[in-house]
Amino acid sequence: MRRTLVLVSLAVTSMVALAFLIPLGLTVREIARDRALTTAERQASALGPVLVVTQDPAALERAVASTQAGAAQRMRVYLPDGQVIPKTTENDTSRRAKPAQLAEAGRRGRSYTASVSGGYALLQPVSLDGGRAAVVEVFVPDGDLSQGVWKAWVVMTMVAAALVAGSVAVADRLGARVIRSTRRLAEAAGSFGDGDLSVRIDPDGPPELVEAGVAFNAMADHVVQLLAAEREMAADLSHRLRTPLAALRLNAEALGDGPVPDQTREAVDRLEREVDLIIRTVRRPTGRGSCDASKVLADRVAFWSVLAEDEGRSCELIGAHRPAELPLPGSELAAAVDALLGNVFRHTAEGTAFAVTLHVGQGVTGILVADAGPGISDPDAALQRGRSTGGSTGLGLDIARRAAESTGGYVRIHRSVLGGAQVQMWFRTRWLPPQRRSRRLVRRRHSRT
């Protein structure tokens, strides 16, 4: 945009400068030409009174020599009897006008400019007694006709160039101001989209961008209020689980001793810790962060392995032997993994094996959850929020998808080597700019359709 403003300013001011510079340059040239010819005509007219008074050659030579053109040997007087003042020799080339041009000047009876070699000859006829006429010739070289023209053109060109440069500089400064305000707004929107809910901007720049900045701040405040209300509602809903949990704990305590009562009480303890974690999480605003995927996977697989042992399921964690940093808060990754593992327990029969694989590549990290169940018949429909063919809410895969797409990644569903479904979450380990990320998501949605 800044470059466009500069180019537009350059084009407009250049056209305006040329529109004035070309006619003005031609006018200056004509003024210089008229000035030279007027000077010559004035000097020629100065000999008119002398010719009327006398035709004495000596007197005329003195009169011619007294003029500026005569002193420069640019003036000649042609008398009616054929004499030329001052006299010329064979080698004298100062005589410029041809006889036909002299006759034409006499016929016209007024000053006449004739084109000659090296310039122009101003021929001024002077009427004498007896119907005779003398002609005064003043030679005007081409240099006098253009004297000062080139200097004036150079000055005008420099002035025009300075005006164009000044307008371009002003346009560049204005463009820089607009670009600076636009980038500040774009960076704030990107940071807000990445989870920094505290970001605000100081509206600056043109009135339109100021209005956009004010609207952004108002939108950000409203979003923060909505999220706060949503977190409080989620916390309240989670808190309501404490009452049935308390009743469940009392019942578990009344079971007495033994392996089954102990497992039941341990399950109730884990459930109560998860509810407390949910309450703390939803009350604390989440933002952009990072985590070690290996540690998160190890913790979540260890949690679900207890239930897997009770149901006779074999579970395996592959590839989590080295650190794998992800630009995602650990709580969000844990929620995505819990959603996928919960689907395995919910939609497959007891004894169905499953495996979790961590794949670390260049710029991308993948988490693959595979099972030996019946698989997913319609993967595209399963990835749509709120749609499920298994009788659940359909939000588990959506949680995983949103976690992956928040880093610029994606979620895919394939057939696993175990015979069932394999849900792949691919995360980008480097943050993408918001524009590139949105374009990637648009292309991905188009490819699905």
Image (spheres, helix red, strand yellow):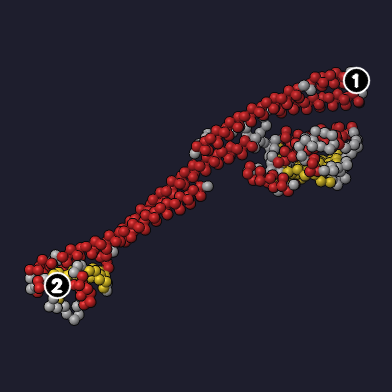
Residue 248 in view here:
yes
Q: Which residue is mark 1?
A: 255
Residue name at image x 68 percent, y 45 percent: 442
Comparing 368 with 73, the one in front is 73
Comparing 121 with 380, the one in front is 121
Residue name at image x 82 percent, y 33 percent: 392
Q: Residue 362: horizontal and vertical position, in percent?
A: 70, 48
Within-10-Å neighbours for mark 1: few <14, some 14–19, many 20+? few
Q: Is residue 69 above or below residue 440?
A: below
Spatial CA span between label 2 and label 1:
148 Å
Helix, strand or loop at label 2? It is strand
Helix, strand or loop at label 1? It is loop
Comparing 56 with 358, the one in front is 56
- First in sequence: mark 2 or mark 1? 2
Q: Residue 310: horizontal and vertical position, in percent?
A: 89, 32
Horizontal side of residue 246 vs 73, given as left or right: right
Horizontal side of residue 386 vs 164, given as left or right: right
Q: Is residue 210 above or below residue 267?
A: below
Q: Which residue is mark 2?
A: 133
Residue 97 in view here:
no
Residue name at image x 80 percent, y 40 percent: 382
> What type is the residue that disc 2 sits on?
Ala
Comparing 355 with 423, the one in front is 423
* Whether label 2 touches label 1, CB < 8 Å: no
Q: Is residue 296 above or below residue 414?
A: above
- Considering every residue shown, the one lying at the far bottom of the view is 90
Q: Residue 116: horizontal and vertical position, in percent?
A: 26, 73
> What type is the residue that disc 1 sits on?
Leu
Q: Residue 316: horizontal and vertical position, in percent?
A: 84, 40
Residue name at image x 53 percent, y 38 percent: 209
Q: Is residue 265 above or below residue 126?
A: above
Rendering quarter of residue 420 = top right
